[in-house]
Image (spheres, rainbow, N blue to C red):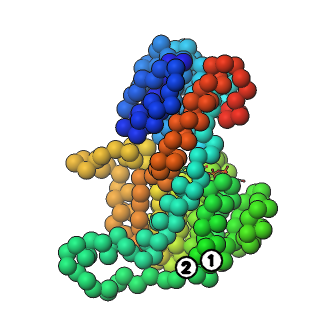
């Protein structure tokens, strides 16, 4: 198959080419959107990532250009209009699971860094400042951690928390028996918000979960709560989070994803003026740690993403049933 890869970075090229086989890849650095969709002429498939825009208007053009498949090299598919793809007879495939531990471990990295302030200690020591003032952390042992969504990543995260001796409570639409055996206690969303010292989000973004965490949820949380989001930015109403940070309701905020990340993340904008005042306000808080959607970013995950993507394309090419098709 001839595949147009969008939002390409050096690592996408490296890992996809390692397992490409007979497939022919052409790599574009630009996002797929209505302005770039014409680049897909002469290809059989497109390969996209989290911030490409695959809405109805783009899909209409993809169909005209003869595209037969949209291969997401990620798990989330909130950026693809599935109904439009179905109508256009374009198959959508994804990588439903690739090293869930990668994201779970990143969530733990955010917790540990925010709590023990190792990022600040690192900078202080390099400037010969050996003071411990304002670096106080807290023990994770016996703290209550609320996990929203106990699918692949949420469960991997619970297993990590177990090792730290945390009391784990969870909310999910479907309870995971393996988690119950581990000692995770399922509670209502309201109880999770009220009881947790740390809340970590691991559910997908959907119309039902958009702004799952807003002013009303913050009102139910403990003062000084730590909130971690490695899932999707729009799970949190950012304006409400800023207000909660100002009122010290949120004691620590760790986010790997941000509602308006698509024009910022994965780009070096160090010499640019950032027009987004919301992210500027977020970064002004000393108790906010933000990473650029890098939870997935381990060697193991990149190599699984590449090989599963090739497997998906092989299935489509050979008209075999593909287990990773995303249906409406
Ligand atoms: P998964 O499908 O295995 O698990 C999601 C869980 O959320 C399921 O158990 C589901 O029942 C639950 N859920 C659905 N709606 C819910 C709701 N309203 N309230 C509570 N729980 C709900 O998915 P996963 O592999 O664990 O991934 C979770 C999310 O992590 C993905 O949707 C994606 O957005 C995000 N993700 C982020 C990165 C990153 O690099 N930061 C990488 C991969 C995935």
Q: Residue at x 58, y 46 (%)?
A: 98
Q: Is any atom of residue 132 visible in this view?
A: yes
Q: Residue at x 43, y 72 (%)?
A: 114
Q: Quick one: label 2, few (<14), some, or many (20+) residues within 10 Å? A: some
Residue 326: quarter of image: top right
* Element at label 2: loop
Vertical position of residue 51 compared to residue 34: above or below: below
Whether residue 13 sits left or right of residue 82 in the image: it is left
Q: Position of residue 151 (x, y in %)?
A: 68, 55
Whether residue 292 sits left or right of residue 174 in the image: it is left
Q: Position of residue 12 (x, y in %)?
A: 43, 37
Vertical position of residue 53 compared to residue 247: above or below: above
Pick the quarter of the image with the N terminus. top right
Residue 183 is labelled as none
The residue lying toward the viewer, choosing from 163 and 167, is 163
Number of numbered discs overlaid on the protein picture: 2
Q: Which residue is mark 1?
A: 166
Q: Position of residue 56 (x, y in %)?
A: 57, 28
Q: Which residue is mark 2?
A: 140
* Element at label 1: loop
């Amino acid at each position: 198959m001839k595949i147009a890869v969008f939002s390409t970075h050096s690592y996408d090229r490296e890992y996809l080419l390692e397992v490409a086989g007979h497939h022919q890849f052409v790599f574009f650095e630009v996002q797929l959107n209505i302005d770039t969709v014409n680049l897909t002429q002469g290809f059989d498939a497109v390969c996209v990532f989290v911030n490409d825009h695959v809405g109805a208007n783009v899909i209409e053009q993809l169909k005209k250009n003869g595209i037969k498949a949209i291969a997401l090299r990620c798990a989330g598919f909130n950026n693809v209009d599935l109904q439009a793809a179905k109508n256009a007879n374009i198959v959508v495939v994804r990588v439903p699971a690739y090293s869930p531990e990668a994201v779970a471990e990143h969530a733990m990295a955010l917790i540990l860094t925010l709590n023990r302030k190792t990022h600040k200690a690192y900078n202080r020591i390099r400037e010969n400042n050996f003071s411990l003032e304002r670096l106080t952390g807290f023990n994770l042992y016996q703290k209550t951690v609320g996990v929203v969504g106990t699918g692949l990543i949420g469960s991997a995260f619970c297993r990590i928390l177990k090792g730290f001796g945390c009391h784990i409570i969870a909310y999910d639409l479907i309870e995971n028996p393996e988690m119950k055996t581990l000692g995770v206690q399922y509670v209502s969303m309201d109880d999770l918000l009220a009881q947790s010292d740390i809340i970590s989000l691991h559910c997908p973004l959907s119309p039902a979960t958009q702004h799952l965490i807003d002013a009303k949820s913050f009102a139910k949380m403990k003062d000084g709560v730590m909130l971690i989001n490695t899932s999707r930015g729009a799970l949190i109403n950012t304006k409400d989070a800023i207000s909660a940070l100002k009122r010290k309701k949120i004691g620590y905020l760790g986010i790997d994803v941000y509602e308006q990340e698509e024009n910022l993340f994965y780009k070096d904008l160090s010499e640019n003026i950032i027009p987004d005042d919301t992210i500027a306000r977020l970064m002004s808080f000393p108790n906010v740690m933000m990473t650029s959607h890098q939870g997935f970013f381990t060697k193991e995950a990149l190599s699984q993403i590449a090989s599963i993507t090739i497997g998906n394309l092989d299935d489509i090419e050979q008209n075999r049933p593909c287990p990773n098709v995303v249906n409406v």
